[in-house]
Image (cartoon, rainbow, N blue to C red):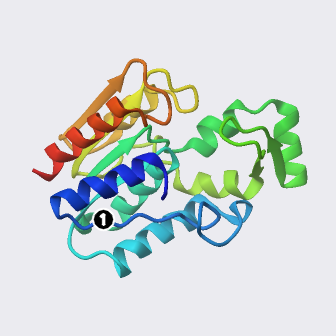
Amino acid sequence: MTGIKAMHLDRFCAGRGLGYVRFDPSGHGQSSGRFTDGTIGAWAEETIAILDRIVEGRVILVGSSMGGWLMLLAALARPGRVAGLAGIAAAPDFTERLIWDRLADEDRERLMNDGRLVKSSAYSDEPTILTRALVEEGRRHLLLTAPIGIKCKVRLLHGMADFDVPYQMSIELAGRLASGDVHVTLVKDGDHRLSRDADLALLTATLVEMVG
């Protein structure tokens, strides 16, 4: 919640007099807990709890990467509370599509037998520890296997130079959504983070259009 995009949104909302809540799921950032204890279902429940206990009225949910999956699950759970969704390199089903499907057979075997797998991270000197629970529990929340009954306004931003989450995932997601008001914006030279000044300006323009 102290990332470039989150802080940019904080300033954007403050300047327009809009309420804004940002948070770190358990095991992330400043929140307690261990990442290795987390699952998609648990993090989605935390997101829904924010809607139920902290936020009033209808909201626009903004989710980046894994947060894009969580915003979708929250919108499905609380459709009356969500006025719109803004995804930034949204990564629904990433535990299956981007982890399990990409693992070599020996890594799959190690993950299933040991319950965890240590992989190097492109974003930190610390390795990423993947757990069997993350993958197996994630299968209960897969969305890209059927139509998605979300009918609100949806805006999806994605960099075409994103080597972590392929931009085709946002196009596929758009096709799955029940809403007829879905726009996908592709940034040809944009990476996974979409945190450059031009990317932030695009995010601002997207939210201005959504807020009205």
Q: Is residue 116 left or right of residue 209?
A: right
Q: Position of residue 122 (x, y in %)?
A: 68, 35
Report the residue that reaches farthest toward the bottom.
53
Q: How crowded is mark 1: few (under 14 residues within 10 Å), some or many (20 or more)?
A: some
Q: Quadrant of residue 27?
A: bottom right
Q: Where is residue 207 in the image (x, y as percent from the top left)?
A: 22, 46
- SS of the residue under disc 1: loop
What amino acid does circle 1 point to?
Tyr
Q: In which quarter of the image is residue 134?
A: bottom right
Residue drawn 44% across the image and 41% down it: 90
Q: Name the residue under label 1.
A: 20
Between 146 and 57, the one lying in front of the other is: 57
Report the residue that reaches farthest toward the top.
188
Residue drawn 57% across the image and 25% down it: 163
Q: Is residue 105 left or right of residue 176?
A: right
Q: In this view, does 194 lie to the left or right of 151?
A: right
Between 212 and 66, the one lying in front of the other is: 212
Q: Position of residue 97 (x, y in %)?
A: 60, 36
Q: Is residue 203 visible?
A: yes
Between 186 and 134, the one lying in front of the other is: 186
Question: How many dots with numbers?
Answer: 1
Asked if 55 appears above or below 201 in the picture, the reply is below
Asked if 89 appears above or below 162 in the picture, the reply is below
Residue drawn 52% across the image and 49% down it: 66
Q: Position of residue 15 (x, y in %)?
A: 20, 57
Q: Can residue 147 be seen in this view?
A: no
Between 113 and 153, the one lying in front of the other is: 153
